[in-house]
Image (cartoon, rainbow, N blue to C red):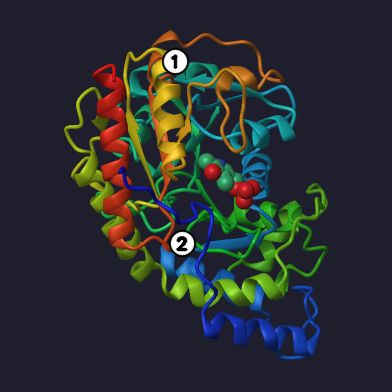
Amino acid sequence: MSEIFSGSFTQQEPLSDAAIAAALEVMRNGRLHRYNVEAGELGEAALLEQEFAAQMGAKYCLAVASGGYAMATALRAVGVKSGDKVLTNAFTLAPVPGSIASVGAEPVFVGVTEDLVIDLDDLAAKAGQAKVLMLSHMRGHLCDMDRLMKICDEAGVTVIEDCAHTMGAAWNGVASGRQGAVGCYSCQTYKHVNSGEGGLLITDDEDIAARAIMLSGSYMLFERHLAAPDPSVFDRIKYETPNISGRMDNLRAAILRPQLADLDTQVERWNARYRCVEEGLRDTPGSRVINRPEAETYVGSSIQFLLLDWSSDKVQEVIRRCGERGVELKWFGGAEPIAFTSRYDSWRYANKQSLPESDRILAGIVDMRVPLTFSLEDCALIARIIRAEVAAVFQGQ
Ligand SMILES: *Cc1c(COP(=O)(O)O)cnc(C)c1O
């Protein structure tokens, strides 16, 4: 009798008592709008920004309605205009090209390597085509950030980092989101902190910060921010910068503050689970786990493995057989976009682009979420199931 996993791949942990107490406090006082504060009161959203800026070692921070909104705001704040080209990853999720499309700009896709990071040779070749790179640290894999920044600096390309999967990660000790001009994070339920929806943006650039704050819908209340540039900076930009409301509210900020304080603990818990699945999958015939460079501090909230050069029928057979045993895998090679997963050629609002080497890799990427509600025993069981099914299909059983 083969083993079956019966847990849920989408179930989150409950919020902590501290987060629930903070939320109740905001609900009892009714001041949910971030600028609805009493004289001398520091609102939850402003405090969240102050704390996240300090945690990341950034000068400025802005909390907004979603990660995608943070990215679109970053694009606007660095000066991307309608019709501009923006470099971005071919291997990512729909909100990334979506943020580029939302400002009327045109994504230029850069390929993916077998380590599931942006292909830096392809980036170097295309760097002359755009002034901005929206760099997605897709599924938490960090590329050689030193080389990436060198390529971009030399080509005069401004880097915006999409850290939806790398909150808590680092490259050579530098926190993810601190190498580019702007770092953007998501607080959506499936990311590393959970407020349902929400986003954070950090930068050291005072003009970018001031524009982002105005863009997010601050009206002329920017002095109520605690991680903002001096009011004199706003004098330079306040008449030219439109208000495109996408603020964070005090209720979400209240439940995020205790979660951010716990981030390091959660990262360790994720990585224990990740390593357990990784160990179980290592050296499975016909498949490969992803190499994690020594310079990378990662957050294993999801895991990928490659079934490189398998036929799509066989990959789908693995996914079906694992699914029957309760293990939910996703595939990045599917022609049709399904649920959260889509391929660059299905984003048809972008110009058609051809990346044959990336197509080969995408066709082999199998992906799995690692929720903190899984125990280490669950992770070991899941790895045994995947290993058995991959080996069975590979050996033609
Ligand atoms: C979730 C996600 C985003 C955007 O986050 P939202 O908060 O859902 O808008 C951006 N990039 C990637 C890679 C994501 O997975």
Q: Which residue is mark 2?
A: 58
* Residue at the image point whose x is 66% and y is 37% from the top: 99
Q: Secondary structure at mark 1?
A: helix
Residue topped by disc 1: 313
Give ligand 1's quarter of the image.
top right
Amino acid type, residue under disc 1 in the picture: Asp
For the residue marked with disc 2, what is the amino acid? Ala
Q: Residue at x 43, y 20 (%)?
A: 111
| Disc 2, SS | loop
Residue 122 placed where, x, y %?
39, 17
183 shown above or below 124: below
Q: Is residue 24 visible?
A: yes
Residue 379 place in picture, x, y as percent: 31, 53
**Residue found at the far front of this picture:** 1
In percent of width and height, residue 40 lies at 71, 91
Which image quadrant is residue 199 in? bottom right
For residue 108, side relative to residue 360 (left or right): right
Classify residue 289 as left or right of residue 362: left
Q: Is mark 1 within 8 Å of ligand 1?
A: no
Residue at 54% x, 73% y: name it.
Answer: 14
Q: CA distance from mark 2 to mark 1?
A: 47 Å
Task: Check the picture and name the quadrant holding the N terminus.
Answer: top left
Task: Count the labels in the image.
Answer: 2
Q: Point out residue 37 in the picture as x, y percentages from the top left corner.
A: 77, 83
Q: Is residue 146 left or right of residue 21?
A: left
In the image, 237 versus 224, the foreground residue is 224
Closer mark to the observer between disc 2 and disc 1: 1
Is 102 in front, or is 219? 102
Snapshot quadrant of residue 224: bottom right
